[in-house]
Image: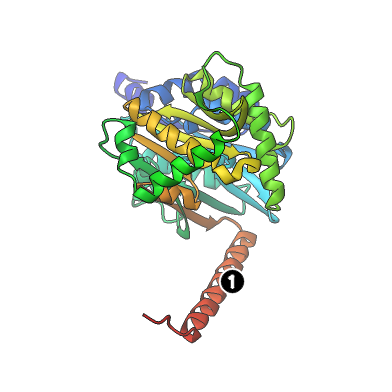
Amino acid sequence: MNAHVRIEAELADRFEIVDSASRLAEIGPAWADLWRRTDGTVFQSHAWVSAWWRTVPGVEGRQLRIGLAWRGSELIAILPLAIQRRKGLRWLEWAAVDCTDYPDVLMALHCPAASVTKLWQQVVALGGFDVYFLNRLRPDGRFRAVLDGPDTPELLPNRRTEVSSQVAGDWATGQQWFDDQSKKMRQTYRRARKTLEETGELVFRLIPLDEPTAPVLARLGELKRRWLASSGRATPLFDEGAPALPALVQVLADAGALRIFVLECDGKVIAISVNFVQRGTLMAFVTSYDAEYERGSPGMVLLMDYVQWAIDQRLREVDFLCGSESFKARYATQQLTLTSVMGPRTLKGRLAMLADDLRHRAQAAIAARRAATTPAAAD
């Protein structure tokens, strides 16, 4: 091989699909290096995806499909995907989507979008799934370069969207932010604090990084299980003794990003928010409160306290992450619409998508007829 051909061969991209836990572990150093170089969020880190894979319930019904693009010995792109069996179908989706609010691809600055497009095509060609569904796509995400490329006709936009909510502004202090809220909101906060203080001494506290997290996570799980039971819901993340949440929190701690805020009444934890700081943003990952103190709105008090803390720390934004809960919209100054793409790989997947589309059309038609026959409200 002459020198010119050898150089071209070294510059050519090589693609790999990781489908085993052992190979996932082997690529850890290269993944971590790319993550650091590209300023990825913790959701795209090797530690996060690995912690999820080690602890996710029902792993026997899942398969890894992590796409890698190499240039020589350098890892230049990671497309972290996995297959899950659900509703009788095999779904290709983001890896760790169960616990990831902003999934995305990792791309080196010199990695062309065409390489990630080819990587996606390699994953699709491998098959093993009926439907792909990639959701929670940020408008500024790096995967957008693939979506907007000319060579990805199989990435079909889907009607399903989600929102994430943020607090952002030019307040110099947390007190300025508080004073900028409506009179009603300030009064509600003060009344809530007074109600809680009638029960006992009220303390807002940031858990020190060297304080063990096990007790507060156990309390968080307890509060979450109560809330889930009262609403007729369940999620394995908060099952007693489940390893996933402690493992993910440990990833945040190891990255130096973990910030756990608690509200204590006479030493008893009545509200918890597991947050982390990255890219100048405080992100609220998991929160809960004790319903026995609901009259004093401890969740609201804790939220307003940690927003003020974040502004005092000169963080540029507080991100409540995904979810359409009313409290997020109430305090947010902005929202992002997160989009999705979805498409079939097999005949079974095509039929399932067709049935889903027909159901959606029927529901929309019923809603339109009801709206047409409902008398308009008087002015």
Outermost residue toward the front in this view: 198
Residue found at x 55% / y 79%: 366
Image vertical order of residue 120 relative to residue 203, above or below: below
Residue 290 location in percent, x, y?
63, 39
Quadrant of residue 172 in the image? Answer: top left
Asked whether the viewer can see residue 16, the reply is: yes
The quarter of the image holding the C terminus is bottom left
Residue found at x 63% / y 31%: 245
Residue sitting nearer the eye, 123 or 248: 248
Q: Which residue is mark 1?
A: 359
Image vertical order of residue 254 relative to residue 235, above or below: above
Residue sitting nearer the eye, 113 or 165: 165
Residue found at x 44% / y 40%: 190
Image vertical order of residue 145 relative to residue 361, above or below: above
Residue 198 location in percent, x, y?
57, 35
Q: Secondary structure at mark 1?
A: helix
The quarter of the image holding the N terminus is top left
Residue found at x 56% / y 76%: 362
Q: Is residue 185 left or right of residue 295?
A: left
Residue type at mark 1?
Arg
